[in-house]
Amino acid sequence: MSFDAILFDCDGVLVDSEPITNGVLRDMLAESGWTMTLDECMRFFVGKAVRDERVAIEARTGRPLTEAWMRQFYERRNRGLDARLEAIAGAHAAVAAAHAHVQQRIACASGADRFKVEMQLTKVGLMDFFDGRIFSGHEMPRSKPAPDVYLAAAAHLNAPPPRCLVIEDTPTGVTAGVAAGATVWAYCPLPEYGAALRQAGASHLFGHMGDLPALLAAA
């Protein structure tokens, strides 16, 4: 089918930020008393807002999740991203193809805070494609897996959600896109995660962002 708009997640889809962000989170949680490996941290937190896991964090650390702790996390995270962030391989070609395919009606709809999304897109050279069309789950009544951020992006582009294509990489994000009524394709570079993405409702999986232009051409 053809699409009126294409809505991209950010972390893990456009930028390779998850190992950096979760490395900082793992270190700070360990300092607070919750020790885990980077893989364990990513399995628990990827696709989720840290604040949304307040109950689990407080139960494992025995400490309140304070605003001061969150500020320190954001500061350390941002320093790490500024130093080491790179785009997902193939993301520039994928975004350019999507931009042309739907006559510029693309948006970035992320569960992350706006500062992080804008900083990351600027750093990897993708901001010009999304400027003015960035939506943060932190600014919505509910973040992913609720559909709010995708519904807001679709409304801004004046595109009915069933005519939108969402590009996601986590079950949480796929769930949000499906709940919005969109078609969801999942970027899945590791085949072992494919079953969970399918179960969440992804209608198609692809293993490299550089595959997206051909997939759109064939849609």
Image (cartoon, helix red, strand yellow):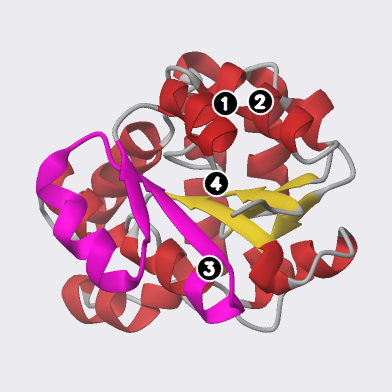
Please report the residue visible at 52 percent of the width from the left and 80 percent of the height from the top: 179
Local SS, label 1:
helix
Residue 205 vs residue 50, the one in the foreground? 205
Q: Earlier in the sequence, mark 4 or mark 3?
A: 4
Q: Residues within 10 Å of mark 2 (few under 14, many from 20)?
A: some
Residue linked to disc 2: 97
Q: Earlier in the sequence, mark 1 or mark 4?
A: 4
Residue linked to disc 3: 177
Q: Earlier in the sequence, mark 3 or mark 2?
A: 2
Please report the residue visible at 69 percent of the width from the left and 59 percent of the height from the top: 136
Q: In the image, which residues are magenta?
A: 178-206
Q: Are marks 4 and 2 in contact (CB under 8 Å)?
A: no
Depicted 193 relative to depicted 48: above or below: above
Please report the residue visible at 82 percent of the width from the left and 45 percent of the height from the top: 105
Identify the amino acid type marked 1.
Ala
Q: Residues within 10 Å of mark 3 (few under 14, many from 20)?
A: many
Q: Are marks 2 and 1 in contact (CB under 8 Å)?
A: yes
Identify the amino acid type marked 3.
Gly
Depicted 118 relative to depicted 205: above or below: above
Identify the amino acid type marked 4.
Tyr
Q: Earlier in the sequence, mark 4 or mark 2?
A: 4
Quadrant that contains the C terminus = top right
